[in-house]
Image (spheres, rainbow, N blue to C red):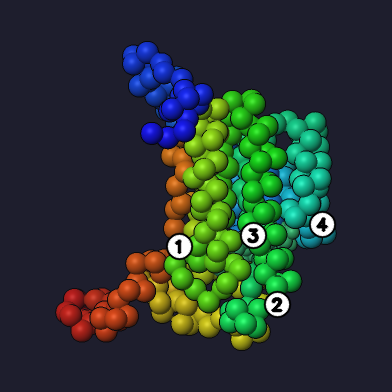
Amino acid sequence: MPPGAATGRHVQPRPRHLALQPKALKETPNVTSSLEGRIAVVTGGASGIGEACARDLAARGAQVVVADVDEPRAQAVAFSIPRGVAGRLDVTRPDDIETVADWVEREYGPPAILVTSAGVLQPPLAPEELPIETWDHVVAVDQRGVYLSCVAFGKRMALRGGGAIVNIASVAGLRSLPLHAYAPAKAAVIGMTQALAAEWGRSGVRVNAVAPGFVMTPALRSAVDAGQRDPAALAEASAMDRLVAPEEVARACSFLASDDASAITGITLPVDAGWLVAGSWHGYGGLRPARMGGGRDGGEP
Ligand SMILES: NC(=O)c1ccc[n+]([C@@H]2O[C@H](COP(=O)([O-])OP(=O)(O)OC[C@H]3O[C@@H](n4cnc5c(N)ncnc54)[C@H](O)[C@@H]3O)[C@@H](O)[C@H]2O)c1
């Protein structure tokens, strides 16, 4: 028996007729993905996937706070979107995050949406070669930073009784890769997404993650330029034989943040052009070519 059930501390039985009603649907039969009037905070919103999320959320009507350690770039993105606002924060610093959370609430109102995209990549070094300082930094930003951001904004959402958090995980958190700091940090993001979803579910806060595949952002471009990633090989390893666009990740984030996902919490949604499902085919001769134009297995000429 789980500890909560044994003591009765966490389990509050309700009459059965009350327990099974999907309240939100009863009250709002016509849900829409418009985010009009909502305040959204995007950490790492100055670049790449975070920037695409900021743009997509703004296009759907949200007022977006672009929160990033790169303040000039955050301002440039904020100025280029409707109702955009920029804030400086380093997600490794709890005080920074609390300060931004207080400031947003005071100046603009309570955030209804948090997207945690602040993150760093790492070189694919053997553990014997990977400096522990690099490991510490990757875990500080990609794991601890996501947790701190979730707690700062999620606890405020929980007290108000509503909100949606979308964490940017990675396919690296779902498969073994030679990224000994990054991949475990992303697995931890998936784990914390599940636990926080359970923690705040009764308070109306949904917590989900997306797991992007390989997205040609400034971060991935730097890794390619440094000879640490091969984009053609990454594309070839996916079912759809291509990389993922930042906007495709952003659309999945906006869906999870919207009322269209009103009963979805605790999940990790891959947005990976089928990279996760294709890898295991390599032991069976690899993926078959496209059928269009008369491939190996037929199709229209
Ligand atoms: N690009 C990919 O292929 C890919 C794939 C899967 C997951 N991701 C994840 O997506 C997220 C965004 O990555 P990206 O590729 O868009 O990178 P990016 O470098 O383009 O953007 C990351 C942003 O995070 C900011 N940032 C870094 N450290 C910070 C800190 N301590 N505090 C606040 N902001 C900080 C940077 O200034 C930058 O604006 C990361 O979590 C990354 O792990 C990326």
Amino acid at dot 3: Asp
Pointer 3 residue Cβ closer than 8 Å to ligand 1: yes
- Mark 4 against mark 1, which lies toward the viewer? 1
The residue wearing badge 4 is: 71
Earlier sequence position, callout 4 versus callout 2: 4
Calculate the distance from the C-alpha at mark 4 to the C-alpha at mark 1. Answer: 32 Å
Calculate the distance from the C-alpha at mark 1 to the C-alpha at mark 3. Answer: 15 Å
- Mark 2 against mark 1, which lies toward the viewer? 2
- Mark 3 against mark 2, which lies toward the viewer? 2
Calculate the distance from the C-alpha at mark 2 to the C-alpha at mark 1. Answer: 24 Å
Q: Quadrant of residue 21?
A: top left
Residues 75 and 153: in front is 153
The residue wearing badge 1 is: 174
The label shown at residue 82 is none
Q: Secondary structure at mark 1?
A: loop
- Mark 4 against mark 3, which lies toward the viewer? 3
The label shown at residue 142 is 3
Earlier sequence position, callout 2 versus callout 1: 2
Earlier sequence position, callout 4 versus callout 3: 4
Earlier sequence position, callout 3 versus callout 2: 2
Q: Quadrant of the N terminus?
A: top left
Amino acid at dot 1: Leu
How crowded is the residue under tag 2: few (<14 C-alpha within 10 Å), some, or many (20+)? Answer: few
Pointer 2 residue Cβ closer than 8 Å to ligand 1: no
The residue wearing badge 2 is: 131
Q: Quadrant of residue 39?
A: top right
How crowded is the residue under tag 3: few (<14 C-alpha within 10 Å), some, or many (20+)? Answer: many
At x 64%, y 48%, the residue is 147
Instruction: Let me know if residue 78 appears in the view.
Output: no
Earlier sequence position, callout 4 versus callout 1: 4
At x 52%, y 43%, the residue is 195
Give x and y (percent) for residue 290: 28, 77
